[in-house]
Image (cartoon, grey):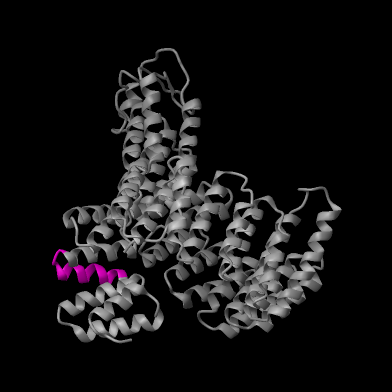
Amino acid sequence: MICPLFNRISLSSSFIWGAMLCACLFWVSPSWSQSKTAQNAHPQIVQPTEEVQSINFRQGQLPGVTLTSSLLFRILAAEMAAQRGSFLPAANTMIKLARETSDPRLAKRALELYVSAGNLPGALESATFWAFLDPRDPEASATKLALSASAGKTEGLVQELVKQVDSTPDKALGFARVMGVLNRMNDRAEALKILEEVLSATKQQNTLIGYMALADIAESGQDFKRAYSEAQKAQALAPRSQDAAMRVLDYGLRVNADQAFAAARLFAKYNPNARQLRMMLTSRLTEQGDFDGALSELADMAKSSPEDFDLLYMQSQVAYRAKRLDQSKRFLEQYVAVQTQRGNANEMGATDASNALADAYTMLSRIAEDQKEYDEAIAYLGKIEEPAARYPARLRQASIRASQGRVDEALRMIDAANPIDEDERLVGLLTVTQILREANRNDDAILRLIEADKKIQNSIEIKYELAMLLERQGQIDKMETYLREVIALDANYAQAYNALGYALADRNKRLPEALTLIMRAHELLPQDPFILDSLGWVKFRMGDLSEAVKYLQQAYDMRPDAEIAAHLGEVFWVQGKKDAARALWLKAVSRDSNNAALNNTMKRFGVKP
């Protein structure tokens, strides 16, 4: 299946980090000989290469390295590779440089890149080397331990964790590091056992820190009774501890909800300023559907803290969840009045009133939409002047108009909205495209995108969206051209490989090539249900029914989408499992009766909804 346009994460910060690193990482030092003792202390350190030339080891300090143009180029090349998404080659380069220079910062950077690549062995190797190069860095030691635990290497872990606690004057901080390590372990029972041994060795087993740590680990392993019990012990030891009270509430809800709520209310009664606990209580009451209880708690908080204006906004949220739209609106109107006064009484930018008003007007607009008061909804959005929220509000106004069938008016609103930068301009263009697509004006959308593609060079989003619209129009050759351009710009854009491969497979064309494309997408995003659907579909087209069912069933289990159901049902039908196919289709059509792929498939096989 062709996946929807998805959000892409910018990696520009990685390149900026690399550039800054290159600017300050090395300094020219006199030619020193590398100490053989230091060189042989760890087998991963290698002799300086010709391009490194010399290393000056100084106890307690970073090594001084003579910078060469070749060394600088290798660092920059690695960062540029990371910028393109090629994390593994970049990580391999960084760890090699770390070995050659003995600089812990390069080992740390290698670790970050291996983590981005999802390569646990490489990350562990880098963390181990980082900790060796900078043994006094608690972050390095903690990271090494955490990754070792994640890899299931627990031998000697208790002793190392005990050292972490004993060497830290602040025991809370020490145990925070211990928890950071144990939380990486997949075997939660083993993590709990190790924690018990650490607590015993550090004589912290009957302390507030100890009880809360045990509660947290037990809860993460779904041992809710143990978690609740340990939390209760913590609260008994420190009756005024808000942290303990929050755990009693949170963990107790899984065991005895009435008892947990009663304990939280009692704590709030005697500790009216325990805002975190009371906010958690409000949230949990709302989740349980006790809206009156949540509103009562917020009202009581407002009496205790009359200047806590955020409580009005929270009350509006709870009322909205309860579908009490008029009540929610009244709270918001009070909130708007307060925030307007704050804004007028202070210089511009001195308070967060502008942001608060933007949130309130957005919420008021949503309520108006729910009440089908569309002009009122648009009017509320028009009041938003916060720079970061103004343009999205204008786009939302246009979307509301488009939903009324007033498409041309919506387009004029977007054209007049004045984006402040290229990012906003792109979002506006994609919103225009969505409005036109939903209005079945694909030709107009294509024309707009073609013009934008000429003005905004190398925009992956524009090219991908254009390709999807061309596919809808059956212009597969042009679609392929744009998708090839996307892949040339970003070799790791999984959706482009998937879209092209699926388009070929769906038309029974160039199936080996389609399989190669989809397999590349699957390598990049192995858990994407749409890509799994494409993989199953191309296997079906190639006649491999067992593999087709495997991938399609996996996709459907992850996301019971109507089109995936259409594909899986068709394979069932061809296998002779007609009853299973019919049952699957009927279940899918009951959830999504307008899906064209599903309806067309059922029609082809004579199955009526």
Seen as rendered, the residue at the extreme top is 30
Residue stretch in magenta: 542-555
Q: Could you tell me which residue is drawn at 66 percent across and 73 percent down?
A: 367
**In the image, what residue occupies the spot 31% across and 71% down?**
564
Residue 554 in magenta stretch:
yes
Residue 399, given in percent of the width and then of the height, sits at: 58, 64
Seen at 29% across and 75% down, the residue is 566
Please state the horizontal and vertical placement of residue 109, each as a whole percent of the image: 42, 38
Q: Position of residue 38 (x, y in %)?
A: 35, 26
Quarter of the image containing the N terminus?
bottom left
Nearest the camera: 80 or 235? Answer: 80
Depth order, front residue of 588/155: 588
Residue at the left extreme, as displayed: 543
Q: Where residue 269 appears, x then y in whole percent?
A: 74, 77
Say above or below: 430 vs 536. above
- Magenta stretch, main secondary structure, is helix
